[in-house]
Amino acid sequence: MNLNNKIGVIVDSFGVGVMEGLKKAKEVGADGVQIYAVSGEMDPATLSPTKRKELLSYIDGLGLEISALCGDLAGHGFQDAEANPEKIEKSKRILDLAVELGSSVVTTHIGIVPDDRSGRIYDAMQRACDELGIYAKSMNAYFAIETGPEPAAHLKSFLDTLSTNGVSVNFDPANMVMVTGDDPVEGVKLLKDYLVHTHVKDGKRIRPVDPRDVYGFLGYGAMDHEKIAEMAASGAAFEEVPLGEGKVDFPAYFAALQEIGYGGYLTIEREVGSNPEQDIRKAVDFIKSYRG
């Protein structure tokens, strides 16, 4: 297999802050990075124009580029119509920052897409995503929904209702394996017209789990990344593991990405584990082993 996609790393996976994380990304052999840009030092509201220039200069100096920013606002995604105006504005500012830093992708979770197309939650999500998609499209950019909360076919049916492809997909094969039991290979083929960014992560499904227990749902509970990481580490329902040790069929997955002509980033995410740097370094080598 001649896999030529650039390799990215989520800087926050190192757990050492942005600047140190950028250095480590370079050290492990990544081509680019994804950075959380919701709060703290990367919050668009607090990142001044001077700091933005300094950050971009530092990233350029390391020979890296930004594959995407993470703009996941947690809670109930965009299921709550009353909370959406504030979240939409925050998401737009994160996309502005991404474009300023040379990236065209902001990944996010929008909440589980409900089955009932006539319900208020579906309507709230659809309206929010349409507004975000139109804004992204105007900037030749994308908000990319991370796979996992629902089967690929259901996510595609939702995306097909939107007026643009400005809301597209950040494909995470491990989330599908761990939570819905969906087939990542078939998922890639189904979502091929929307796939703009990917995560490279591995995992195992221990037993069936209600996606609402993982990702939350309006009136049921909110999504909490720390809780998800704890669930992934505990192995009670599912377990995130180093690449090649789980149930993601990477030869078939990478082949499917090549088949659809995906030329974007393969970005490594490691949310658990006692030695993330070691796991990420091995993950870079794992991906490189598929290069011709």
Image (cartoon, rainbow, N blue to C red):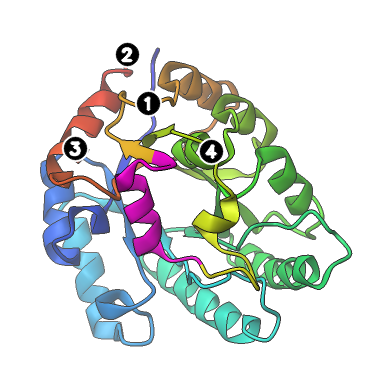
**Label 4 to label 3: alpha-carbon separation:** 21 Å
* Dot 4 crowding, Cα within 10 Å, few <14, some 14–19, many 20+: many
The answer to whether marks 1 and 4 mark residues whose Cβ atoms lie closer than 8 Å is: no
Which sits earlier in the primary sequence, circle 4 or circle 3?
Answer: 4
Q: Which residue is mark 4?
A: 176
Which sits earlier in the primary sequence, circle 2 or circle 1?
Answer: 1
Q: Which label number is shown at residue 279?
A: 3
SS for tag 3? helix
Image coordinates for residue 123, horizontal then vertical, percent: 80, 70
- Specify the amino acid type for callout 1: Asn
- Specify the amino acid type for callout 4: Met
Nearer the camera: disc 3 or disc 1: 3
**In this picture, residue 136 sits left or right of residue 290:** right
- The relative height of residue 221 versus residue 198 in the rendered view (above or below) is below
- The relative height of residue 141 versus residue 286 in the rendered view (above or below) is below
Nearer the camera: disc 4 or disc 2: 4
The residue segment tinted magenta is 223-238
Q: Which residue is mark 2?
A: 292
- Specify the amino acid type for callout 2: Gly
Q: Which residue is mark 1?
A: 4
**Label 1 to label 4: alpha-carbon separation:** 24 Å
Which sits earlier in the primary sequence, circle 2 or circle 3?
Answer: 3
